[in-house]
Amino acid sequence: MFKSKWSALKNEATNEFLAYFKQEWIVQHPGWYEGYAPGVPSTNNALESTNGSIKKDCTIRKRLALARFLELVETKIIMEWSTNRNPDKPISPVLFVTATPISHQLWVDAFHTSISNRESIAIDNKRTKEKIHYMCSGRELSNSLKVFYKDYKQHKDNLSWNNFDALKDYQSSLWQINFVENKTQWKESTCNCRNFQKDYICKHLIVLAIRYGYEIVPLTAQTVELGCKVARGRPARVTKALNVIPVPPSKANKRANLEMNEDTTSKKAKKL
């Protein structure tokens, strides 16, 4: 449908690009898009970080011979890294992260989405005996959510889309969330939105976790207005309401003496 949409223009440059795109990114390299391999990193950032650690702490940025480098790997890198990453290490072990961390900005987005009462429905999955949640993406739907979902499901099962634009609009109007109803395992849930395909966490999962009572939004995220640019660094702590700041004794005595002097001078002025 994508090809038929742009081929209808009958433009020579467009047809050349379509031919190039098909040969390069569909025939030869079909695994270029996010979501092709779920759970696998889409960048080599971790590899570059490991390479930087080896240069900084082990080789001191010197080019070693292969035999010397393999000896260094066996005697220092494997031994030290294995010891440091042992969870039973008594002092500050370097543990592997098994769950995706939630950033401050993601908490802010999830909080504002949760208070907006974004409409969603839950459908029982007979095959896996789990619930699949469908949540509105924020676009205005032509019908109610239940009616729109039935139309969406019919088109999806029968592949009966009229054109590419209709497919794109339908796909971006509802997000499908396979939510794990467990307080400790809800982060294993999946969503078909673009943010989850990249980061393996999204605000839609957090919104459902808030509704199920699995998570509580931090106070630092509740005080940020939607659309405001979050300042760099750690967010400031939220102070308690009606919190009175105590005055040091020295300043309190000076203030009392000053008030007494003002009262005496005012009384003398009245007598005169």
Image (spheres, rainbow, N blue to C red):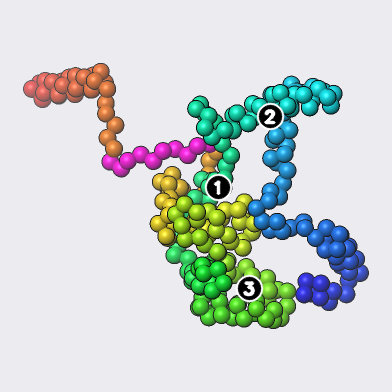
First in sequence, mark 3 or 1: give its number: 1
Determine the residue positioned at 8% across, 22% down: 271
Label 3: few (<14), some (14–19) or many (≥20) C-alpha neighbours in 10 Å:
some
What is the span of residues highlighted in magenta in the rendered image? 233-242
Percent x, y for residue 188? 55, 55
Vertical relation: 1 (above or below) 111: below
- As helix, strand or loop, the secondary structure at mark 1 comes to loop
Vertical relation: 173 (above or below) 264: below
Task: Kindly identify which residue carries mark 1.
Answer: 99
Determine the residue positioned at 41% across, 46% down: 219
Find residue 144 and name its label.
Answer: none
First in sequence, mark 1 or 2: give its number: 2
Amino acid type assigned to the residue bearing label 2 in the image: Ile
Measured in 3D between alpha carbons, the distance from the residue under mark 1 to the one under mark 2, in whole angstroms, is 25 Å
Q: Is residue 137 visible?
A: no
Find residue 170 and name its label.
Answer: 3
Amino acid type assigned to the residue bearing label 1 in the image: Ala
* Near-viewer residue (19 or 254): 19
Task: Kindly identify which residue carries mark 2.
Answer: 78
